Image (cartoon, rainbow, N blue to C red):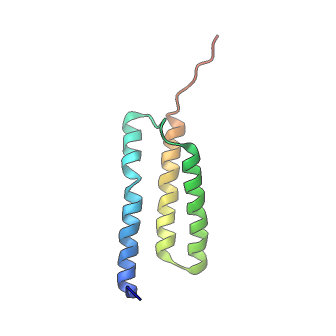
């Protein structure tokens, strides 16, 4: 085995921080500009769905690293999707 249990835990924590930190610039930019037109709603839904499936897997094998990172992924994805919906351009209907 390449890593012992402690080293593998540290690796999982670092990987989790990197993956979750990747969402923050998008959320901050979207909040500041009030625009998320270039963010695909389908991508957000697919990522959240994948996160939920990984969460089920994490609970099944009782792995706190998998559970933790996927809870974070689901939360950050839902925040991004929520901002996208909130700031969606209103298409005015002709009178």
Q: Which residue corresponds to the image point at 40% horizontal and 86% vertical from the top-left?
A: 5
- Which image quadrant for residue 41? top right
Measured from the top left, where is residue 70 in percent x and y?
51, 64
Quarter of the image that includes the C terminus? top right
Q: Which residue corresponds to the image point at 48% horizontal and 46% vertical from the top-left?
A: 80
Asked if residue 38 is positioned above or below residue 72 in the image, the reply reads: above
Measured from the top left, where is residue 86 in percent x and y?
52, 36
Closer to the camera in the image, 12 or 67 = 12
Asked if residue 29 is positioned above or below residue 54 in the image, the reply reads: above
Q: Which residue corresponds to the image point at 41% horizontal and 67% vertical from the top-left?
A: 16
Measured from the top left, where is residue 83 in percent x and y?
49, 41
Farthest top residue in view:
95
Asked if residue 28 is positioned above or below residue 49 in the image, the reply reads: above
Quarter of the image that includes the N terminus? bottom left
- Which image quadrant for residue 59? bottom right
* Left or right, residue 66 beside residue 93: left
Asked if residue 36 is positioned above or below residue 71 in the image, the reply reads: above
Measured from the top left, where is residue 81 in percent x and y?
53, 45
Q: Which residue corresponds to the image point at 42% horizontal and 34% vertical from the top-left?
A: 34
What number of labels is visible? 0
Closer to the camera in the image, 64 or 42 = 42
């Amino acid at each position: 085995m390449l890593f012992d249990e402690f080293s593998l835990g540290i690796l999982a924590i670092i990987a989790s921080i990197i993956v979750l930190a990747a969402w923050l610039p998008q959320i901050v930019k979207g909040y500041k500009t009030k625009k998320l037109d270039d963010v695909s709603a389908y991508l957000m839904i697919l990522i959240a769905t994948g996160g939920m499936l990984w969460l089920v897997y994490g609970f099944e094998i009782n792995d706190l690293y998998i559970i933790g990172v996927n809870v974070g992924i689901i939360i950050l994805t839902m925040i991004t999707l929520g901002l996208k919906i909130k700031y969606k351009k209103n298409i005015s209907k002709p009178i």
